[in-house]
Image (tube, rainbow, N blue to C red):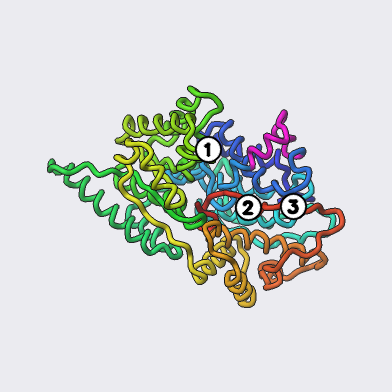
Amino acid sequence: MSGEGGKSLQQALAELLTVAARAGVAEDRARTEALSLAAALAESAPSAPVDWAKANPGATTQDFFDSAVRGRRWRGAPTAVLSELIAEGSAEKVAYAEALAEVASAACTLGEPTMRVIGNASVAAAAQLQAAGARPLQVGATPVQAGSTPALPATSAAEAGQAEPAAAAEAVEAEPAKTVEELLADLDELTGLARVKREVHRQVAVLRVEKLRTEAGLKSPTITRHLVFVGNPGTGKTTVARLVSGIYKALGLLSKGQLVEVDRSELVAGYLGQTATKTADVVASAAGGVLFIDEAYSLTSGDNGADQYGREAVDTLVKEMEDRRDDLVVIVAGYPEPMEAFIAANPGLASRFRTTIGFENYTDDELTDILTGLAEAADYELVPEALEKFREILATTPRDSSFGNGRFARNALEAAIGRHAWRLRDVTAPTKDQLRQILAEDLTDDPEPPPEAKPEPPGESEEPDQSEQGDEA
């Protein structure tokens, strides 16, 4: 929520930290994550860094954009802390997801919000709530008026028939973790990915039998559990990695089952010697779960070839994988050919990554299903004409290696939600259908911005973020 009667980022952050304390999450970690999410959502809003810094005293404009880069992966997927709470079956996972949704809503108060910020925030809030099994966003917000601060639809805990947070904390017990069968069913429900599903099912069968043979005192070959995911952006790699982490935990191969997602910037430091420590710390945070390294080939190659910082990170990673081999799984991901070169660059990698799973591009029908699912999660409905318009857009969109797949669908929905809000700007009392329905015109190019609005920075919709199936690596 934002604007009149809505929460500021400071207020939303304070409420999230209260939930984090109940859940046993370190305050600094929860704060940093929430601020990164807010920055990622408000990145296109002029003057957003100034308002963002009010909730993060001493922060600079560069800090804002650095945080935005880190938070982009959570625009369509649960944050790292929420993922851990879900993996643990924490009693606070729903409350934490709701607090994150409020942070997303509060991002609309930063600077001079653009229509894109509204779409970003709506989809991100829905992703947090859906991941935790919380209620969907409820439509009923006042449409955006020219010159006003936009508001996201939301409901209070009382409206949802929930108890106050303190009472809820006492009454709710941690939920039992999902079984292997339930997690495999979740995998099978994903749109497309037929080959991926078959390979994961095969891998689970092999690992299950290996575990049973070991428990029975029989000889069994040691099967590496580490995986290579190859495919273009947005093909669901992070979503599947998250399910794999839960499956391995359910099989008794991992103690926690959380997913820690990183890229080169989170492994490599600015000086030699520091990289080893930084990489080791990241691996330690993933112990008991899955470490997911996106664009892993960036560690061993670049515009000028391999660099010593990346090699130091890889050497440390190999050592940590050996030291923690009983309670750590590493999944590396990226484009097919660069990933082959990455694995071949270090003998330690080649011996540990023996299973490669390929992720194919989505078909038009699958992308339409993904768009529909994302819209439903955010409590919007695409009318038939809007779906037809999306298919027309897909038909004229090049499908080279830079095509975003599920991310393309998510970007389309985010933009459509912003246009939808602008279309209703002069409607005093819109009906529920008007508030929910995305029309074909909402999927066309942006209308002329109001005089006081500033254009978004070029390329904003092509940023390299990763997240759920609508925003995947």
Q: Residue furthest left?
A: 218
- Establish if 21 lies above or below 397: above
Magenta residue span? 51-68
Residue ID for mark 3 = 456
Answer whether residue 66 is magenta in the image: yes
Q: CA distance from mark 1 to mark 2?
A: 58 Å
Task: Give how far apart the Cα atoms at labels 3 and 2 are.
Answer: 37 Å
Q: Position of residue 94 (x, y in %)?
A: 53, 48
Q: Is residue 137 above or below residue 21?
A: below
How many numbered discs?
3
Quadrant of res 397: bottom right
- Structural distance between the alpha carbons of marks 3 and 1: 32 Å
> Is residue 332 rendered to the left or right of residue 206?
right
Q: Residues within 10 Å of mark 2 (few under 14, many from 20)?
A: few
Q: Residues within 10 Å of mark 1 (few under 14, many from 20)?
A: few
Residue 117 in sight from this viewpoint:
yes
Q: Which residue is mark 2?
A: 158
Q: Secondary structure at mark 1?
A: loop
Residue 23, how many percent across, how many down? 51, 37
Residue 304's disc is 1
Sequence-earlier tag: 1 or 2: 2
For residue 79, side relative to residue 289 (left or right): right
> Which residue type carries mark 3?
Glu
Instruction: Please state which of residues 235 and 150 is positioned toward the viewer in this rendering.
Output: 235
Does the magenta stretch mainly form a helix, a strand or a loop? helix
Estimate the x, y position of residue 27 in percent, counting from the top left.
Answer: 58, 31
Q: Is residue 155 visible?
A: no
- For image coordinates 42% across by 31% down, the residue present is 284
Instruction: Tell me the mark number nearer the camera, choosing from 3 and 2.
Output: 3
